[in-house]
Amino acid sequence: GPVEFRRNKPSHFDGGYNPEKAELWIKEIEKIFRAMNCPDNQKVNYVVFMLVGEAEYWWDSTRRLLEGGGITITWEVFRAKFFEKYFPNDVRRAKEIEHMQLKQGNMTVGEYASKFEELGKYSAFFYHPDERMKCIKFEDGLRPELRKAVGILEISYFLTLIHKCQFLESFDHNKDNRPKSFGPQFNKKRNNEGKPYDRPQ
């Protein structure tokens, strides 16, 4: 019940224009709901107590409009209205475009993979039933020499692809952490040969 919900110490939400904060708040609330097996018909009752300030005023007016229109306010209705207000489609679309255009650039494989996953939730590639599609998108953003090295392997599992990229990256690790080349150069003597390497996590 409400006591159990509050025992999980849910955060308050005060509105404002911060789409990522809004999304994280909803995820936090839904995580609590799952942990306590909250019934769907109680979710809205619990969550509105966590709205304060501007967000509370927004919900009061939105609720009146919905009830005036004869709409039953389920959790899905609340969630949709919440995102419509605090994480609008144009912002979501901008995130999707950022993901589609993401390139590794000067990032390590680990940094690129983290950014790819962070933005990936806004892209259809992220939820494609064939994981190979996600791998292809990741490969497209890699630096050319690394993309060429892993592309021929046709890896179909995302974690395997990341580990393979990190493995290749470690061969040519240098002082600025940027892999320069792959292939025959692996066997050449290098100034930093023999130095310890901290594999990216």
Image: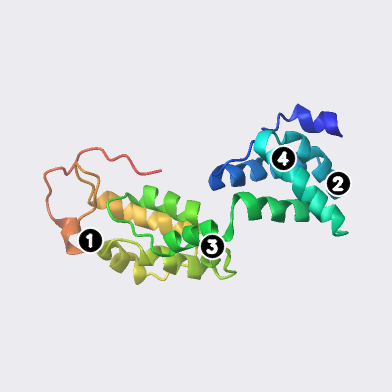
Residue drawn 71% across the image and 54% down it: 81
Instruction: Indicate which disc, 4 or 3, sits on the residue closer to the N terminus.
Output: 4
Instruction: Indicate which disc, 4 or 2, sits on the residue closer to the N terminus.
Output: 2
Instruction: Indicate which disc, 1 or 3, sits on the residue closer to the N terminus.
Output: 3
Q: Nearer the viewer, residue 84 or 133?
A: 84
User: Which residue corresponds to mark 4?
Assistant: 57
Residue drawn 31% across the image and 50% down it: 107
Label drawn at residue 126 = 3
Q: Secondary structure at mark 2?
A: loop
Q: Nearer the viewer, mark 4 or mark 3?
A: 4
User: Which residue corresponds to mark 2?
Assistant: 39
Q: Nearer the viewer, mark 4 or mark 2?
A: 4
Alpha carbons under labels 2 and 1: distance apart: 55 Å
Residue drawn 29% across the image and 53% down it: 169
Q: Secondary structure at mark 1?
A: loop
Dot 3 amino acid type:
Phe
Q: Secondary structure at mark 4?
A: helix
Q: Answer yes or no: do the residues labelled 1 and 3 have beta carbons within 8 Å?
A: no
**Residue 31 as seen in the image, left or right of residue 125:** right
